[in-house]
Amino acid sequence: MGIVVNLDVMMAKRKKGLTELAGEVDITMANLSVLKNNKAKAVRFSTLEAICKALDCQPGDILEYVPDGEEQS
Amino acid sequence: MGIVVNLDVMMAKRKKGLTELAGEVDITMANLSVLKNNKAKAVRFSTLEAICKALDCQPGDILEYVPDGEEQS
DNA sequence: ATGAAATTATCGAAAAACGATAAAAATATA
DNA sequence: TATATTTTTATCGTTTTTCGATAATTTCAT
């Protein structure tokens, strides 16, 4: 399946919506939405850093590698 | 400090050198070296996926967020 | 000393992020 | 239902960055 972005989980845990997070991460809501919904094909580390900072988490909390043929957690 | 790439650890664990890994990941050794030594500013998910596949690991094993003022593990 | 592995650097092309913006869809709320 | 809020989706243009190809240099083991 590839790399899966699990932003939803941490956002729910921190109780932050797209609007709020977008403000903190300093990225447009539209672009953050793209990332959240697995429409992005790459990330800049600066963006990943800002997200981890805002959500107080690690990249591993957000990015997951799902081998082909396996279902997502 | 930002996002830190810890490729070395997993490579050592899997006993794979740059040359071998580069072949499996299908990326030039030069570019993989850049990523390994924290010179990259972004990653494509396709690349991250190939690395996770080759090293049988998760993004979290490779990428680490180190908050400002903290030392690396 | 010799050879292999790794690092570093440069150039160019292709890919993709991201901002800005707008419209549509979904969701919540009164 | 009606209204407001949030989220999703899309497009355009600019900028950033990857990545291949390549070569030179450095490191490291033998």
Image (cartoon, coloured by chain):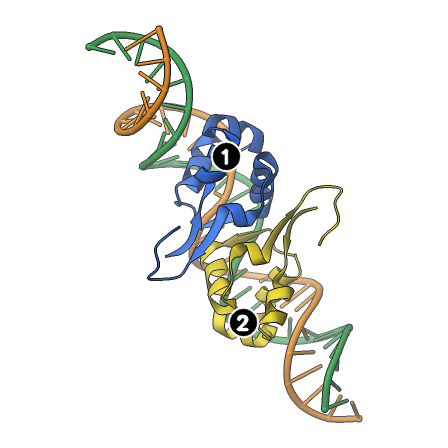
Chain colours: A blue, B yellow, C orange, D green
Quarter of the image for residue D26 reads bottom right
Q: Which residue is mark 2?
A: B22
Residue at image coords 63%, 71%: B12
Q: In the rendered view, tell whether residue D22 sits above or below residue A26.
A: below
Establish if B4 lies above or below A29. Answer: below
x and y percent of residue B36 in the render? 63, 62
Does residue A41 appear in the picture of this structure? yes
Is residue B26 visible in the rendered image? The answer is: no
Which quadrant of the view contains residue B68?
Answer: top right
| SS class, disc 1 | helix
Residue for badge 1: A13
Say what amino acid the circle numbered 1 marks: Lys
| Image quadrant in which you'd find residue C6 | bottom right
- Give the camera-side residue of D15 and B13: B13
Question: Tag 1, which chain?
Answer: A
Secondary structure state at the residue bearing disc 2: helix
> Looking at the picture, which amino acid does disc 2 mark?
Ala
